[in-house]
């Protein structure tokens, strides 16, 4: 697929996604790598635009340079921090060990969790609060170190259960709580499924993503 075709398809996908206002987004493509520039109305819309671009066949990577510009809405840092903390408190997936600090609309998350999904949930919750323009996630995983071979087999089994994944094209290595994934997949959906499977293994504190998306 040519870059012009990829660009056109990404533009169509952005227009089709109801969470994204595509009017102020410029799309360029070079060698299958897509760059998004322009402005959106929320951090959540910025992440939705990146996901929309990754869904397009032929896209190898997305450089998300979108800027969040809030229209007629601003909150003091203390009020915004309170809103973020309240939102996380109401979410049962986010433990009370997570804290948030706010500067000029940017939220910095700190603290500790046992599972990656808890860290992902905290980032998603914070990014959904009105007034947030960006989120930096510095939450640490503190789960006990797992047995390397057990983790490797657990991830391989997860690959086999997932209809989107061909376990034979991916290799798994583990050390000190880190999982390294290598190989090729046919889409970003497969890529994300593999990463999710690795993070879901007990005791994993880091995932090295060496997976290539090839069409």
Image: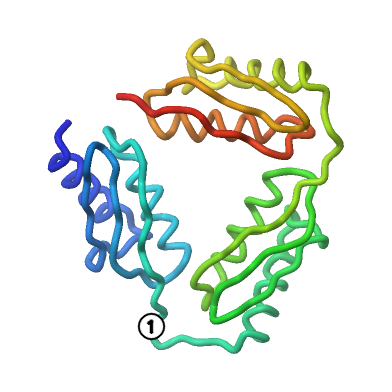
Which residue extends farthest right? 144
Of residues 154 and 214, the one drawn nearer to the viewer in this rendering: 214
- The residue shown at (48%, 14%) is 169
- The residue shown at (41%, 71%) is 68
Q: Position of residue 206 (x, y in %)?
A: 68, 38
Query: Would you say 20 lies left or right of 74 here?
Result: left
Q: Quadrant of the C terminus?
A: top left
Which residue extends farthest top? 168
Give the residue pinned by disc 1.
Answer: 71
- Picture quarter containing residue 156? top right
Is 11 above or below relative to 132?
above
Query: Would you say 142 lies left or right of 80 here?
Result: right
- The residue shown at (44%, 70%) is 42
Is 107 above or below relative to 97?
below
Q: Position of residue 103 (x, y in %)?
A: 60, 79
Determine the secondary structure under disc 1. Answer: loop
Query: Would you say 212 lies left or right of 103 here?
Result: left
Q: Position of residue 92 (x, y in %)?
A: 75, 56
Q: Position of residue 203 (x, y in %)?
A: 79, 34
- The residue shown at (24%, 47%) is 10
Is 198 above or below relative to 8?
above
Is 162 above or below relative to 199?
above
Query: Would you say 107 lies left or right of 141 here?
Result: left
Of residues 89 and 145, the one drawn nearer to the viewer in this rendering: 145
């Amino acid at each position: 697929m040519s870059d012009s075709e990829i660009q056109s398809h990404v533009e169509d996908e952005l227009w089709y996604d109801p969470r994204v206002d595509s009017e102020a987004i410029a799309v360029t493509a070079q060698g299958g790598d897509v760059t998004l520039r322009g402005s959106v109305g929320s951090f959540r819309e910025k992440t939705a635009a990146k996901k929309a671009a990754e869904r397009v066949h032929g896209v190898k990577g997305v450089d998300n340079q979108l800027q969040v510009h809030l229209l007629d809405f601003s909150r003091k840092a203390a009020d915004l921090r309170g809103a973020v903390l309240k939102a996380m408190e109401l979410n049962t997936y986010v433990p009370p060990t997570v804290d948030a600090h706010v500067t000029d609309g940017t939220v910095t998350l700190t603290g500790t969790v046992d599972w990656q999904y808890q860290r992902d949930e905290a980032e998603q919750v914070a990014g959904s609060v009105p007034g947030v323009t960006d989120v930096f996630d510095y939450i640490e995983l503190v789960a006990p170190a797992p047995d390397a071979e057990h983790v490797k087999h657990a991830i391989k089994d997860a690959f086999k259960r997932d209809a989107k994944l061909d376990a034979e094209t991916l290799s798994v290595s583990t050390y000190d709580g880190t999982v390294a994934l290598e190989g090729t997949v046919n889409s970003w959906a497969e890529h994300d499924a593999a990463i999710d499977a690795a993070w879901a293994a007990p005791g994993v504190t880091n995932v090295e993503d060496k997976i290539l998306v090839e069409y």
